[in-house]
Protein backbone atom coordinates (compact mmCIF):
# COMPACT_ATOMS: atom_id res chain seq x y z
CA UNK A 1 0.00 0.00 0.00
CA UNK A 2 1.61 3.32 -1.04
CA UNK A 3 1.62 6.33 1.25
CA UNK A 4 0.00 8.32 -1.56
CA UNK A 5 -1.68 7.66 -4.89
CA UNK A 6 -1.70 10.62 -7.28
CA UNK A 7 -4.17 11.09 -10.13
CA UNK A 8 -5.62 13.89 -12.24
CA UNK A 9 -8.97 12.98 -13.80
CA UNK A 10 -8.26 13.87 -17.44
CA UNK A 11 -9.68 11.05 -19.59
CA UNK A 12 -8.60 11.59 -23.20
CA UNK A 13 -10.84 8.92 -24.68
CA UNK A 14 -13.94 10.33 -22.99
CA UNK A 15 -13.57 13.77 -24.61
CA UNK A 16 -14.58 13.95 -28.31
CA UNK A 17 -12.80 17.30 -28.81
CA UNK A 18 -9.58 16.05 -27.27
CA UNK A 19 -9.78 12.93 -29.44
CA UNK A 20 -9.94 15.14 -32.51
CA UNK A 21 -6.87 17.07 -31.36
CA UNK A 22 -4.86 14.12 -29.98
CA UNK A 23 -2.03 16.19 -28.54
CA UNK A 24 -1.71 14.92 -24.96
CA UNK A 25 1.18 15.80 -22.70
CA UNK A 26 2.45 14.13 -19.54
CA UNK A 27 0.99 15.67 -16.34
CA UNK A 28 4.20 17.30 -15.11
CA UNK A 29 2.53 18.82 -12.03
CA UNK A 30 1.81 15.52 -10.31
CA UNK A 31 5.03 14.01 -11.61
CA UNK A 32 6.97 16.76 -9.83
CA UNK A 33 5.00 15.98 -6.67
CA UNK A 34 5.78 12.30 -7.08
CA UNK A 35 9.53 12.77 -7.47
CA UNK A 36 9.74 15.24 -4.58
CA UNK A 37 7.89 12.93 -2.20
CA UNK A 38 9.78 9.83 -3.31
CA UNK A 39 13.03 11.66 -2.67
CA UNK A 40 11.70 12.46 0.82
CA UNK A 41 11.19 8.76 1.48
CA UNK A 42 7.49 8.29 0.74
CA UNK A 43 6.03 5.47 -1.32
CA UNK A 44 4.10 7.24 -4.07
CA UNK A 45 2.28 5.80 -7.08
CA UNK A 46 0.62 7.58 -10.00
CA UNK A 47 -2.59 6.48 -11.68
CA UNK A 48 -2.36 8.32 -14.99
CA UNK A 49 -5.90 8.69 -16.29
CA UNK A 50 -4.99 10.17 -19.70
CA UNK A 51 -5.13 6.87 -21.60
CA UNK A 52 -7.22 5.05 -19.00
CA UNK A 53 -10.91 5.29 -18.06
CA UNK A 54 -12.89 6.31 -15.04
CA UNK A 55 -14.16 2.73 -14.76
CA UNK A 56 -10.56 1.47 -14.42
CA UNK A 57 -9.72 4.17 -11.88
CA UNK A 58 -12.86 3.50 -9.85
CA UNK A 59 -12.17 -0.24 -9.89
CA UNK A 60 -8.66 0.43 -8.59
CA UNK A 61 -9.95 2.68 -5.81
CA UNK A 62 -12.53 0.10 -4.75
CA UNK A 63 -10.26 -2.92 -4.80
CA UNK A 64 -6.87 -1.57 -3.62
CA UNK A 65 -6.08 -1.12 0.05
CA UNK A 66 -7.07 2.50 0.69
CA UNK A 67 -4.53 5.05 1.89
CA UNK A 68 -4.25 8.70 0.77
CA UNK A 69 -5.42 9.87 -2.64
CA UNK A 70 -4.09 13.13 -4.09
CA UNK A 71 -6.13 14.59 -6.95
CA UNK A 72 -4.92 17.36 -9.25
CA UNK A 73 -7.92 19.40 -10.43
CA UNK A 74 -8.27 22.26 -12.86
CA UNK A 75 -11.07 24.09 -14.61
CA UNK A 76 -11.51 21.32 -17.20
CA UNK A 77 -11.54 18.41 -14.77
CA UNK A 78 -13.65 19.71 -11.88
CA UNK A 79 -16.64 17.41 -12.40
CA UNK A 80 -14.35 14.40 -12.85
CA UNK A 81 -12.42 15.29 -9.69
CA UNK A 82 -15.65 15.60 -7.70
CA UNK A 83 -16.82 12.18 -8.90
CA UNK A 84 -13.42 10.63 -8.12
CA UNK A 85 -13.50 12.11 -4.63
CA UNK A 86 -16.90 10.58 -3.95
CA UNK A 87 -15.82 7.10 -5.05
CA UNK A 88 -12.57 7.36 -3.11
CA UNK A 89 -14.21 8.46 0.12
CA UNK A 90 -16.80 5.69 -0.11
CA UNK A 91 -13.93 3.20 -0.55
CA UNK A 92 -12.13 4.47 2.54
CA UNK A 93 -9.46 6.73 1.04
CA UNK A 94 -8.36 10.00 2.63
CA UNK A 95 -8.60 12.63 -0.09
CA UNK A 96 -6.36 15.63 -0.73
CA UNK A 97 -7.03 17.88 -3.72
CA UNK A 98 -4.89 20.63 -5.25
CA UNK A 99 -4.08 22.35 -8.52
CA UNK A 100 -5.03 25.59 -10.26
CA UNK A 101 -8.71 25.58 -9.23
CA UNK A 102 -9.23 24.09 -5.74
CA UNK A 103 -7.63 27.01 -3.91
CA UNK A 104 -10.34 29.30 -5.23
CA UNK A 105 -13.13 26.82 -4.44
CA UNK A 106 -11.76 25.32 -1.24
CA UNK A 107 -15.10 25.20 0.59
CA UNK A 108 -16.80 23.55 -2.37
CA UNK A 109 -14.11 20.87 -2.74
CA UNK A 110 -14.18 20.18 0.99
CA UNK A 111 -17.94 19.93 0.87
CA UNK A 112 -17.62 17.46 -2.00
CA UNK A 113 -15.46 15.08 0.00
CA UNK A 114 -11.88 16.35 0.20
CA UNK A 115 -10.25 16.15 3.63
CA UNK A 116 -7.68 18.80 2.68
CA UNK A 117 -7.38 21.37 -0.08
CA UNK A 118 -3.80 22.35 -0.90
CA UNK A 119 -3.34 25.83 -2.31
CA UNK A 120 -0.12 27.09 -3.84
CA UNK A 121 2.77 24.74 -4.63
CA UNK A 122 2.09 21.29 -3.30
CA UNK A 123 5.48 19.64 -2.73
CA UNK A 124 6.38 20.80 0.78
CA UNK A 125 2.75 20.91 1.93
CA UNK A 126 2.11 17.33 0.89
CA UNK A 127 5.34 16.22 2.52
CA UNK A 128 4.23 17.74 5.83
CA UNK A 129 0.70 16.38 5.51
CA UNK A 130 1.84 12.84 4.71
CA UNK A 131 4.32 12.90 7.58
CA UNK A 132 1.59 13.91 10.01
CA UNK A 133 -0.87 11.32 8.66
CA UNK A 134 1.73 8.54 8.76
CA UNK A 135 2.69 9.41 12.35
CA UNK A 136 -0.93 9.78 13.48
CA UNK A 137 -0.24 13.32 14.64
CA UNK A 138 -3.79 13.69 15.94
CA UNK A 139 -2.99 11.29 18.79
CA UNK A 140 -0.44 13.68 20.31
CA UNK A 141 -1.65 17.05 19.01
CA UNK A 142 -5.36 17.56 18.27
CA UNK A 143 -4.57 20.95 16.69
CA UNK A 144 -1.98 19.64 14.21
CA UNK A 145 -4.03 20.53 11.14
CA UNK A 146 -3.97 24.22 12.03
CA UNK A 147 -0.16 24.17 11.90
CA UNK A 148 0.19 22.97 8.29
CA UNK A 149 0.71 26.00 6.06
CA UNK A 150 -0.96 26.02 2.66
CA UNK A 151 -4.07 23.94 3.40
CA UNK A 152 -7.76 24.38 4.03
CA UNK A 153 -9.97 21.88 5.88
CA UNK A 154 -13.19 21.54 7.84
CA UNK A 155 -13.03 21.54 11.63
CA UNK A 156 -16.31 20.08 12.89
CA UNK A 157 -17.96 21.52 9.82
CA UNK A 158 -16.33 24.94 10.12
CA UNK A 159 -14.13 26.07 7.25
CA UNK A 160 -10.51 26.72 8.19
CA UNK A 161 -7.79 28.05 5.90
CA UNK A 162 -4.23 28.23 7.17
CA UNK A 163 -1.68 30.86 6.10
CA UNK A 164 0.00 30.30 2.73
CA UNK A 165 3.26 28.40 2.48
CA UNK A 166 6.42 30.05 1.20
CA UNK A 167 7.21 29.06 -2.35
CA UNK A 168 10.17 26.87 -3.23
CA UNK A 169 13.14 29.20 -3.50
CA UNK A 170 15.54 26.86 -5.29
CA UNK A 171 13.91 24.97 -8.14
CA UNK A 172 17.24 23.34 -8.97
CA UNK A 173 17.06 21.45 -5.68
CA UNK A 174 13.92 19.70 -6.91
CA UNK A 175 14.30 16.36 -8.72
CA UNK A 176 13.09 16.06 -12.29
CA UNK A 177 9.47 14.98 -12.67
CA UNK A 178 8.98 11.23 -12.15
CA UNK A 179 8.32 10.42 -15.79
CA UNK A 180 9.18 6.77 -15.11
CA UNK A 181 6.03 6.58 -12.94
CA UNK A 182 3.87 6.70 -16.09
CA UNK A 183 4.14 5.62 -19.72
CA UNK A 184 5.60 8.76 -21.29
CA UNK A 185 6.52 6.83 -24.43
CA UNK A 186 2.81 6.37 -25.12
CA UNK A 187 2.40 10.16 -25.18
CA UNK A 188 5.24 10.47 -27.66
CA UNK A 189 3.89 7.64 -29.80
CA UNK A 190 0.35 9.08 -29.76
CA UNK A 191 1.67 12.35 -31.13
CA UNK A 192 3.70 10.54 -33.76
CA UNK A 193 0.76 8.34 -34.82
CA UNK A 194 -1.63 11.25 -35.27
CA UNK A 195 0.70 14.07 -36.32
CA UNK A 196 3.81 12.40 -37.71
CA UNK A 197 6.00 13.83 -34.94
CA UNK A 198 6.43 12.64 -31.38
CA UNK A 199 6.50 15.37 -28.75
CA UNK A 200 7.59 15.79 -25.13
CA UNK A 201 7.06 18.63 -22.65
CA UNK A 202 9.29 20.21 -20.02
CA UNK A 203 9.43 23.41 -17.98
CA UNK A 204 12.27 25.85 -17.38
CA UNK A 205 10.52 28.10 -14.83
CA UNK A 206 7.51 28.49 -12.57
CA UNK A 207 5.12 31.39 -12.43
CA UNK A 208 4.31 34.56 -14.34
CA UNK A 209 4.96 38.06 -12.94
CA UNK A 210 2.39 39.79 -15.15
CA UNK A 211 -1.00 40.92 -13.90
CA UNK A 212 -3.57 40.20 -16.60
CA UNK A 213 -6.89 40.60 -14.81
CA UNK A 214 -8.48 37.42 -16.20
CA UNK A 215 -5.54 35.09 -15.53
CA UNK A 216 -5.31 32.81 -12.49
CA UNK A 217 -2.19 32.75 -10.30
CA UNK A 218 -3.51 30.23 -7.79
CA UNK A 219 -0.52 27.88 -7.75
CA UNK A 220 2.59 30.00 -8.29
CA UNK A 221 1.36 33.52 -7.55
CA UNK A 222 2.81 36.43 -9.48
CA UNK A 223 6.37 35.19 -9.22
CA UNK A 224 8.91 34.02 -11.74
CA UNK A 225 11.50 31.51 -10.63
CA UNK A 226 13.87 29.98 -13.14
CA UNK A 227 15.92 26.82 -13.17
CA UNK A 228 19.61 26.89 -13.98
CA UNK A 229 19.82 26.75 -17.80
CA UNK A 230 22.56 24.11 -17.68
CA UNK A 231 20.35 21.85 -15.56
CA UNK A 232 17.48 22.35 -17.99
CA UNK A 233 19.75 21.30 -20.85
CA UNK A 234 20.75 18.25 -18.79
CA UNK A 235 17.09 17.25 -18.58
CA UNK A 236 16.42 17.95 -22.23
CA UNK A 237 19.44 15.93 -23.31
CA UNK A 238 18.14 13.02 -21.22
CA UNK A 239 14.66 13.38 -22.75
CA UNK A 240 16.10 13.27 -26.26
CA UNK A 241 18.05 10.13 -25.47
CA UNK A 242 15.26 8.38 -23.57
CA UNK A 243 12.21 9.08 -25.75
CA UNK A 244 13.68 10.25 -29.10
CA UNK A 245 11.00 12.92 -29.66
CA UNK A 246 10.80 14.88 -32.90
CA UNK A 247 9.57 18.11 -31.29
CA UNK A 248 9.05 19.57 -27.83
CA UNK A 249 6.70 21.88 -25.97
CA UNK A 250 8.18 24.31 -23.43
CA UNK A 251 5.38 24.48 -20.88
CA UNK A 252 6.40 27.82 -19.30
CA UNK A 253 3.79 30.56 -19.00
CA UNK A 254 6.18 32.96 -20.80
CA UNK A 255 9.40 31.40 -22.08
CA UNK A 256 11.31 34.58 -22.97
CA UNK A 257 10.87 36.66 -19.80
CA UNK A 258 14.56 36.54 -18.84
CA UNK A 259 16.74 37.39 -21.82
CA UNK A 260 20.04 36.59 -20.10
CA UNK A 261 18.68 33.14 -19.27
CA UNK A 262 17.84 32.55 -22.95
CA UNK A 263 21.38 33.57 -23.91
CA UNK A 264 22.90 31.09 -21.46
CA UNK A 265 20.51 28.32 -22.48
CA UNK A 266 21.27 28.84 -26.17
CA UNK A 267 25.00 28.86 -25.47
CA UNK A 268 24.78 25.54 -23.61
CA UNK A 269 22.66 23.94 -26.33
CA UNK A 270 25.20 25.15 -28.87
CA UNK A 271 28.12 23.83 -26.80
CA UNK A 272 26.57 20.34 -26.68
CA UNK A 273 25.42 20.45 -30.32
CA UNK A 274 21.84 19.76 -29.20
CA UNK A 275 18.86 20.72 -31.31
CA UNK A 276 15.13 19.99 -31.05
CA UNK A 277 12.32 21.82 -32.85
CA UNK A 278 9.95 23.26 -30.24
CA UNK A 279 7.08 25.64 -29.62
CA UNK A 280 6.54 27.98 -26.71
CA UNK A 281 4.47 30.87 -25.36
CA UNK A 282 5.78 34.42 -25.20
CA UNK A 283 4.69 38.03 -25.01
CA UNK A 284 5.24 40.60 -27.71
CA UNK A 285 7.09 42.89 -25.31
CA UNK A 286 9.59 40.11 -24.51
CA UNK A 287 10.49 39.42 -28.13
CA UNK A 288 13.19 41.46 -29.83
CA UNK A 289 15.52 40.72 -32.74
CA UNK A 290 18.17 39.11 -30.55
CA UNK A 291 15.68 36.82 -28.80
CA UNK A 292 14.02 35.81 -32.04
CA UNK A 293 17.40 35.05 -33.61
CA UNK A 294 18.27 32.84 -30.65
CA UNK A 295 14.89 31.11 -30.74
CA UNK A 296 15.34 30.42 -34.45
CA UNK A 297 18.82 29.02 -33.78
CA UNK A 298 17.43 26.80 -31.03
CA UNK A 299 14.82 25.35 -33.39
CA UNK A 300 11.67 27.21 -32.36
CA UNK A 301 9.10 26.54 -35.07
CA UNK A 302 6.11 28.27 -33.47
CA UNK A 303 5.66 31.06 -30.92
CA UNK A 304 2.28 31.57 -29.30
CA UNK A 305 1.84 35.27 -28.65
CA UNK A 306 -0.85 36.38 -26.21
CA UNK A 307 -2.82 38.96 -28.15
CA UNK A 308 -6.37 38.70 -26.71
CA UNK A 309 -7.71 41.73 -28.60
CA UNK A 310 -6.89 44.25 -31.29
CA UNK A 311 -8.47 47.00 -29.22
CA UNK A 312 -5.92 48.92 -27.17
CA UNK A 313 -8.73 50.15 -24.94
CA UNK A 314 -9.62 46.57 -24.01
CA UNK A 315 -5.99 45.52 -23.61
CA UNK A 316 -5.47 48.35 -21.16
CA UNK A 317 -8.59 47.36 -19.22
CA UNK A 318 -7.19 43.82 -18.99
CA UNK A 319 -3.86 45.15 -17.63
CA UNK A 320 -2.12 43.29 -20.42
CA UNK A 321 0.80 45.71 -20.51
CA UNK A 322 1.21 45.22 -24.27
CA UNK A 323 0.50 47.44 -27.28
CA UNK A 324 -1.29 46.20 -30.40
CA UNK A 325 1.60 47.49 -32.49
CA UNK A 326 4.04 45.37 -30.49
CA UNK A 327 2.06 42.25 -31.29
CA UNK A 328 1.99 43.07 -34.99
CA UNK A 329 5.73 43.75 -35.06
CA UNK A 330 6.40 40.48 -33.21
CA UNK A 331 4.35 38.48 -35.72
CA UNK A 332 6.16 40.12 -38.64
CA UNK A 333 9.54 39.48 -37.02
CA UNK A 334 8.77 35.79 -36.46
CA UNK A 335 7.67 35.44 -40.07
CA UNK A 336 10.95 36.97 -41.24
CA UNK A 337 12.76 34.14 -39.44
CA UNK A 338 10.47 31.38 -40.74
CA UNK A 339 8.99 30.89 -37.28
CA UNK A 340 5.25 30.35 -37.21
CA UNK A 341 3.16 32.64 -35.04
CA UNK A 342 0.08 31.70 -33.07
CA UNK A 343 -2.38 34.06 -31.44
CA UNK A 344 -4.83 33.65 -28.57
CA UNK A 345 -7.86 35.92 -28.89
CA UNK A 346 -10.77 36.64 -26.58
CA UNK A 347 -14.31 37.81 -27.31
CA UNK A 348 -16.74 39.26 -24.81
CA UNK A 349 -14.43 40.81 -22.26
CA UNK A 350 -16.20 43.28 -20.00
CA UNK A 351 -16.88 46.53 -21.84
CA UNK A 352 -16.31 45.14 -25.33
CA UNK A 353 -18.27 46.93 -28.06
CA UNK A 354 -18.61 46.46 -31.80
CA UNK A 355 -15.73 48.84 -32.44
CA UNK A 356 -13.49 46.55 -30.37
CA UNK A 357 -14.55 43.52 -32.40
CA UNK A 358 -13.77 45.42 -35.59
CA UNK A 359 -10.39 46.42 -34.16
CA UNK A 360 -9.59 42.76 -33.41
CA UNK A 361 -10.59 41.70 -36.92
CA UNK A 362 -8.45 44.45 -38.42
CA UNK A 363 -5.57 43.49 -36.13
CA UNK A 364 -5.56 39.81 -37.15
CA UNK A 365 -6.19 40.64 -40.80
CA UNK A 366 -3.17 42.97 -40.76
CA UNK A 367 -0.84 40.76 -38.70
CA UNK A 368 -1.73 37.53 -40.54
CA UNK A 369 -0.55 35.02 -37.89
CA UNK A 370 -0.15 31.46 -39.09
CA UNK A 371 -2.77 30.24 -36.66
CA UNK A 372 -5.15 31.79 -34.16
CA UNK A 373 -7.60 30.52 -31.59
CA UNK A 374 -10.56 32.38 -30.15
CA UNK A 375 -12.55 31.91 -26.99
CA UNK A 376 -15.39 33.75 -25.31
CA UNK A 377 -14.00 35.17 -22.08
CA UNK A 378 -15.02 33.45 -18.88
CA UNK A 379 -14.40 34.55 -15.29
CA UNK A 380 -12.06 32.36 -13.24
CA UNK A 381 -12.73 32.64 -9.54
CA UNK A 382 -9.89 34.30 -7.69
CA UNK A 383 -9.05 36.72 -10.50
CA UNK A 384 -9.74 40.49 -10.57
CA UNK A 385 -11.96 39.93 -13.62
CA UNK A 386 -14.17 37.52 -11.65
CA UNK A 387 -14.45 39.99 -8.77
CA UNK A 388 -15.30 42.83 -11.15
CA UNK A 389 -18.31 41.07 -12.72
CA UNK A 390 -19.30 38.75 -9.88
CA UNK A 391 -22.71 40.40 -9.43
CA UNK A 392 -23.57 39.51 -13.05
CA UNK A 393 -22.68 35.82 -12.91
CA UNK A 394 -25.34 33.15 -13.43
CA UNK A 395 -24.61 29.56 -12.40
CA UNK A 396 -26.66 27.32 -14.70
CA UNK A 397 -25.70 23.92 -13.28
CA UNK A 398 -24.73 22.62 -9.84
CA UNK A 399 -21.13 23.57 -9.08
CA UNK A 400 -19.84 19.98 -9.12
CA UNK A 401 -21.26 19.31 -12.57
CA UNK A 402 -20.00 22.42 -14.35
CA UNK A 403 -16.98 24.70 -14.69
CA UNK A 404 -16.23 28.41 -14.78
CA UNK A 405 -16.41 28.16 -18.57
CA UNK A 406 -20.15 27.49 -18.29
CA UNK A 407 -21.02 30.47 -16.13
CA UNK A 408 -23.17 33.01 -17.96
CA UNK A 409 -22.71 36.75 -17.58
CA UNK A 410 -25.95 38.69 -17.31
CA UNK A 411 -26.30 41.38 -19.96
CA UNK A 412 -23.54 40.08 -22.22
CA UNK A 413 -24.16 39.23 -25.86
CA UNK A 414 -25.42 35.74 -26.67
CA UNK A 415 -23.20 32.84 -27.73
CA UNK A 416 -24.68 33.14 -31.24
CA UNK A 417 -23.39 36.70 -31.43
CA UNK A 418 -19.84 35.61 -30.70
CA UNK A 419 -20.16 32.69 -33.11
CA UNK A 420 -20.93 35.21 -35.86
CA UNK A 421 -18.02 37.38 -34.72
CA UNK A 422 -15.81 34.32 -35.06
CA UNK A 423 -17.09 33.58 -38.56
CA UNK A 424 -16.55 37.18 -39.57
CA UNK A 425 -13.00 37.18 -38.23
CA UNK A 426 -12.06 34.00 -40.07
CA UNK A 427 -13.71 35.06 -43.31
CA UNK A 428 -12.07 38.51 -43.25
CA UNK A 429 -8.62 37.05 -42.53
CA UNK A 430 -8.98 34.46 -45.28
CA UNK A 431 -10.25 37.11 -47.70
CA UNK A 432 -7.17 39.22 -46.98
CA UNK A 433 -4.90 36.22 -47.59
CA UNK A 434 -6.54 35.33 -50.89
CA UNK A 435 -6.47 38.96 -52.02
CA UNK A 436 -2.70 39.05 -51.51
CA UNK A 437 -2.07 36.03 -53.74
CA UNK A 438 -0.44 36.62 -57.08
CA UNK A 439 -3.09 34.50 -58.80
CA UNK A 440 -6.60 35.21 -57.59
CA UNK A 441 -9.46 32.88 -58.45
CA UNK A 442 -12.56 35.12 -58.82
CA UNK A 443 -14.91 32.38 -57.60
CA UNK A 444 -12.90 31.99 -54.37
CA UNK A 445 -12.93 35.73 -53.85
CA UNK A 446 -16.69 35.93 -54.37
CA UNK A 447 -17.30 33.03 -51.99
CA UNK A 448 -15.27 34.68 -49.24
CA UNK A 449 -16.95 38.04 -49.81
CA UNK A 450 -20.31 36.28 -49.43
CA UNK A 451 -19.14 34.66 -46.17
CA UNK A 452 -18.09 38.08 -44.86
CA UNK A 453 -21.46 39.57 -45.77
CA UNK A 454 -23.41 36.72 -44.17
CA UNK A 455 -21.34 36.88 -40.98
CA UNK A 456 -21.92 40.63 -40.73
CA UNK A 457 -25.63 40.08 -41.19
CA UNK A 458 -25.63 37.43 -38.49
CA UNK A 459 -23.70 39.68 -36.15
CA UNK A 460 -26.14 42.53 -36.69
CA UNK A 461 -29.17 40.25 -36.30
CA UNK A 462 -27.97 38.91 -32.94
CA UNK A 463 -26.59 42.19 -31.56
CA UNK A 464 -29.61 42.70 -29.32
CA UNK A 465 -29.55 39.15 -27.92
CA UNK A 466 -28.05 39.04 -24.43
CA UNK A 467 -27.60 36.49 -21.66
CA UNK A 468 -30.73 36.44 -19.49
Image (tube, rainbow, N blue to C red):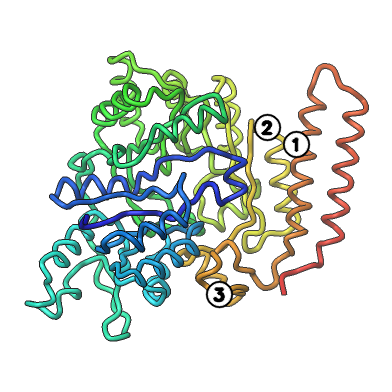
Q: Where is residue 155 in the image (x, y as percent from the top left)?
A: 26, 82
Cβ atoms at labels 3 and 2 below 8 Å apart: no
Mark 3: give few (<14), some (14-19) or many (20+) Cα within 10 Å. Answer: few
Q: Is residue 115 above or below residue 4?
A: below
Q: Residue furthest front?
A: 63
Q: Specify the quadrant that holds the N terminus.
A: bottom left
Q: How far apart are marks 1 and 3 (CA)?
A: 39 Å
Label 1's element?
Answer: helix
Task: Indicate the quadrant where residue 453 lies.
Answer: top right
Q: Nearer the viewer, mark 3 or mark 2?
A: 3
In the image shown, does 335 or 10 lie closer to the viewer? Answer: 10
In the image shown, does 95 or 337 lie closer to the viewer? Answer: 95
Could one spot residue 383 in this view of the protein?
A: yes
- Residue position for label 2: 368
Q: How far apart are marks 3 and 2 (CA)?
A: 41 Å
Q: Which residue lies furthest to the left in this view?
A: 140
Image point (54%, 28%), residue name = 193
Image point (59%, 40%), residue name = 21
**134 sits to left or right of 219:** left
- Residue position for label 1: 429
Question: For residue 456, which numbered disc appears in the image?
Answer: none
- Residue position for label 3: 398
**25 sits to left or right of 163:** right
Sequence-first disc among 2 and 1: 2
Sequence-first disc among 1 and 3: 3
Task: Indicate the quadrant where residue 450 lies.
Answer: top right
Cβ atoms at labels 2 and 1 below 8 Å apart: yes
Q: Where is residue 363 in the image (x, y as percent from the top left)?
A: 68, 40
Mark 1: give few (<14), some (14-19) or many (20+) Cα within 10 Å. Answer: many
Label 3's element?
Answer: loop
Label 2's element?
Answer: loop
Q: Specify the quadrant that holds the C terminus.
A: bottom right
Amino acid sequence: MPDLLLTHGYFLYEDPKEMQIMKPYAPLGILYLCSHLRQAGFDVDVFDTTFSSRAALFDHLRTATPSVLGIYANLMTRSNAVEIMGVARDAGWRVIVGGPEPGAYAQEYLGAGAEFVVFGEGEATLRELLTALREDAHKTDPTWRSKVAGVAYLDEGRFQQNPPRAQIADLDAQPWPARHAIDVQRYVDTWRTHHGQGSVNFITARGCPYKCRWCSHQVYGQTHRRRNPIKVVDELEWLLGKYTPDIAWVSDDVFTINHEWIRQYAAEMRRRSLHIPFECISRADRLNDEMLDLLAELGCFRIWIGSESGSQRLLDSMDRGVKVEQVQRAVAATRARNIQSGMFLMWGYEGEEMQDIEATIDHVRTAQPDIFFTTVSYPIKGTPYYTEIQSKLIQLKPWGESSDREIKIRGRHSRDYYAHADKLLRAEVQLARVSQQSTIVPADLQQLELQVALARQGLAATASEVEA
